[in-house]
Amino acid sequence: MTLPELAVFDELLTYVRETSLLQTSADLLEWDERTGMPVQGGEYRARQVTLLRGMVHERRTSATLGQWLAQLQDAFAADESTSPRRSAIARMREDFERDCRLPRTLVESLATATVRGQQAWERARHEDDFSLFRAELTEILRLKREAALCLAKEGESLYDALLGEYEPGARVAELAPVFASLRQHLVELIGRIGVVPKHQAPKIECLRREYPVETQRSFSRLVAEAVGFDFRRGRLDETTHPFCTSLGPDDCRILTRYQSHWFPSGLFGTLHEAGHGIYEQGLPRAWYGCPPGTYASLGIHESQSRLWENLVGRSLGFWKYFFPLLEQSFPQSLGNVGCEQFHAAVNAVQPTLIRVEADEATYNLHILVRLEIEQELLSGELLVEDLPAAWNARYREVLGIEPSSDAAGVLQDVHWSAGLIGYFPTYTLGNIYAAQLFQAAERELGALEEMFSEGEFAPLLQWLRTHIHRHGRSYDAAELIARACGERPNSEPLVASLNARYGRIYSL
Ligand code: ZN
């Protein structure tokens, strides 16, 4: 790079970082909207977020930015190295071209529609009445279809255009066989579990006893800290629908929800979001707001949360370490329960209606239902007014159970109300990647569960820092996985890990 080019690069970075300041300000307003904002504050908040998102979009598509990127890309044309600078420019250019395809008016309309959509969804869910959300969802779908038309490259389907926003490079046609094979194995595994005599299956009654929320709060915090979430650079709060958001290099917010008579909700919600947070906290700090300091894809993000939630948090080693502390925290509820019994309980398989609380065997079936439905909604094959009936029918068919209410059915997820269409497949990809990463880490580090039973989580964390976190967005998800695990994304390690775990617990 010549000196004038270096100067342009610095100018570009300053500009991109300022855009990130605006972006994270809008994110903070949204965090507040989903945690503490008074109900009546919604309309004004929608205007604030709309203005900021519009300004961000304006900056991300400005002609000056385009000129800088063109100039620097030329400078790197002959450079074969994989320096962060080179990959930063390439990624920024991709983003720029993508953003330029969306008109500002559409971005603003989507920002307004999704703030209103989330408010309507909250109300509809609270009142258990889908019709209160129908008009808002129809509008969101109309706008997302318009966005997909703008974004789709030649030969790309509308759904792929939206999926690409969350999982760059992924295509439904390529995912379909991987997902179909996973579905077949899962249905087979659930079938084998289903015929296990009742007395041999884990008893989950111990999870439904009373767990005072205040004690759950401190226990969840202790666990999140033990696995590596840094509370000096983040915090844990509560909300209806748990999530994680990064508001700056040293400010990561994670949220969970506690239920006094259902223990898994709070702790596993915390571990899941802490996994997301640990990833955010491990991204290269010096590049915050720029591609090398940003997550690779949502599938990779989800692999981190699912890894800590399930492969660590539901392992026997983990509970050998934490169960004595849990007993001390809840002596009344756990007096006559043993560690192995508790571990089996948190791994019980039972088709249920709620995705976020589903066990690992049935979880991906929830995703596959949503994937089919949202493709049909986007293409117009399924009308919004027919959605609750279609949802219920699909649950009956795939999971063998049917929601008795909209709140426990079609209204359970925040995604569609937030305009996140094409997002669900990243959850299943996350499960697939997580199992691959865990297997690769274990190959290198040795028996991980034995480490967990001693309270040692740092070796695994360090392995993830080295193989995933420090690369930021330098590679597409599939390449990142191939580099870390020595194989392309595939569902075999996930199927093997589920078969091994449930084989032990259910004596299959
Ligand atoms: Zn997640």
Image (cartoon, rainbow, N blue to C red):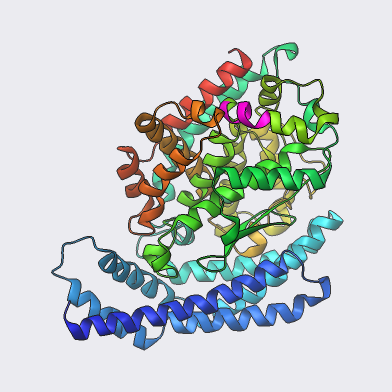
Give above or below for 149 relative to 461. Answer: below
Question: Is residue 319 covered in magenta?
Answer: yes
- Residue at (47% x, 32% y) in the render: 494
Q: Nearer the viewer, residue 467 or 240?
A: 467
Q: Quadrant of the C terminus?
A: top right
Give how far across and how far down residue 99 sits, in percent.
43, 74
Say which quarter of the image contains residue 51: bottom right
Q: Quadrant of residue 192?
A: top right
Residue at image point 72% right, 33% down: 326
Where, quadrant-wise, is the N terminus in this rendering?
bottom left
| Residue drawn 34% across the image and 81% down it | 12
Asked whether, in this view, residue 240 is left or right of residue 87, the answer is right
How many marks do you count on the picture?
0
Q: Confirm whether residue 392 shows in the render.
A: no
Q: Characterize the magenta stretch by its predominant secondary structure.
A: helix
Left or right position of 90 against 470: left
Based on the picture, tell me whether residue 296 belongs to the magenta stretch. no
Question: Depth check: 75 or 441 in front?
Answer: 441
Over which residues does the magenta segment extend? 317-323
In the rendered image of this protein, does residue 501 appear above or below residue 326?
A: above
Please state the horizontal and vertical placement of residue 335, each as a whole percent of the image: 82, 24
**Residue 294 visible in rendering:** yes
Q: Residue at 53% x, 31% y: name it.
A: 452
Residue 280 position within the rendered picture, expressed as x and y whole percent measured from the top left: 50, 57
Query: Looking at the image, is 4 positioned above or below residue 38?
Result: below
Residue 218, horizontal then vertical, whole percent: 73, 47
